[in-house]
Amino acid sequence: MEEHIQLDMKCMPSHVAIIMDGNGRWAKQRGMERTFGHQAGAETVHQIVEEAARLGIKYLTLYTFSTENWNRPTEEITALMGLLFEHIEEETFMKNNVSFKVIGDIDKLPNYVLGKLKKCIEHTSRNTGMSLVLALSYSSKWELTEAARQIATEVKDGKLQLSNIDSDTIQQHLATKDMPDVDLLIRTGGEQRLSNYLLWQCAYAELYFCDTYWPDFKEQELRKAIADYQNRERRYGKTSEQLRSDD
Ligand code: IPE
Ligand code: IPE
Ligand code: MG
């Protein structure tokens, strides 16, 4: 039997971001098509969403499809879009009091997917529990470029003074404007890179990399990542001694 991992419920990360990687390799290991791995990965998403909601995490952002993923084979993209459509379950969100959101250049998504996403965002918008955010057709460089464009337009139109631009201005023009920065970033699948995900928002995130392929990343693995996070000291540039005297 697996040991039960004890967590300090008072020190939960508010915002957990996950790069869900390793579906393709998981399938290959079993002699199956990559799509089979994506299917299994979708099941894991449901389990992790429910566990995160149970643990009282306020924001869960899942890297579901990157800007760069548009370069994958057409059949794989089509299969991923189909799975996305199939797995957006309003009932599960309502049951768990989850409000559903997306970030990314979503107008690039096929219409049938976009329609369902928009309905689900609208119908769950009054839920007061966890915010579940899917990053779809998302990349940080896209997001920051959009922010620069919007800010420049406001300056040009005289709505914003150049001298008033500070880091809050940037934050307020990001797709994640109403969300806190990432506390804990998890990447499954063994790679240790950020792949263009939430670069601004991860400025002070604790990074957690594990070898487990996404389809095998179950509730216990999430608890393990959070336990690891809870053992770290977040100093934000200060010294340990300063932090102790701040308490
Ligand atoms: C992550 O798994 C899912 C998406 C990027 C959509 P991958 O499909 O990248 O799986 P690997 O990295 O090839 O194993
Ligand atoms: C990152 O995974 C994107 C998602 C998990 C959606 P990738 O598998 O696409 O990342 P790279 O290309 O290996 O960096
Ligand atoms: Mg990958």
Image (cartoon, rainbow, N blue to C red):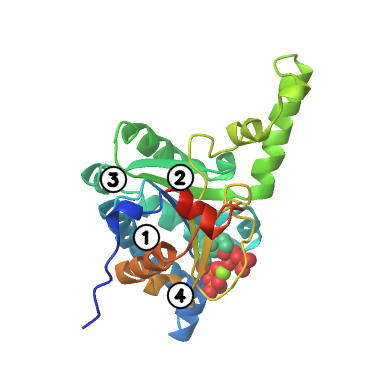
Q: Which residue is mark 1?
A: 45
Answer few, some or many: residues within 10 Å of disc 4's Cα (few below 14, many 20 plus, some between 14 and 19).
Answer: many
Which residue is located at x 45 percent, y 75 percent? 213
Marks 4, 2: nearer the viewer: 4
User: Where residue 213 is drawn, which disc sits there?
Assistant: 4
Instruction: Tell me: 65 left or right of 121.
Output: right
Mark with earlier residue (3, 4):
3
Answer few, some or many: residues within 10 Å of disc 2's Cα (few below 14, many 20 plus, some between 14 and 19).
Answer: some
Residue 203 or residue 39, whichever sits in front: 203
The kind of residue on which mark 1 rests is Val
Q: Residue 80 placed where, x, y %? A: 48, 59
User: Where residue 124 is drawn, which disc sits there?
Assistant: none
Answer few, some or many: residues within 10 Å of disc 3's Cα (few below 14, many 20 plus, some between 14 and 19).
Answer: many
User: Where residue 113 is drawn, which disc sits there?
Assistant: 2
The kind of residue on which mark 4 rests is Tyr
Q: Residue 214 placed where, x, y %? A: 44, 70
The kind of residue on which mark 3 rests is Phe
Assess mark 4: CB under 8 A from ligand 1?
yes
Q: Residue 93 placed where, x, y %? A: 28, 45
Tell me the element at label 1: helix
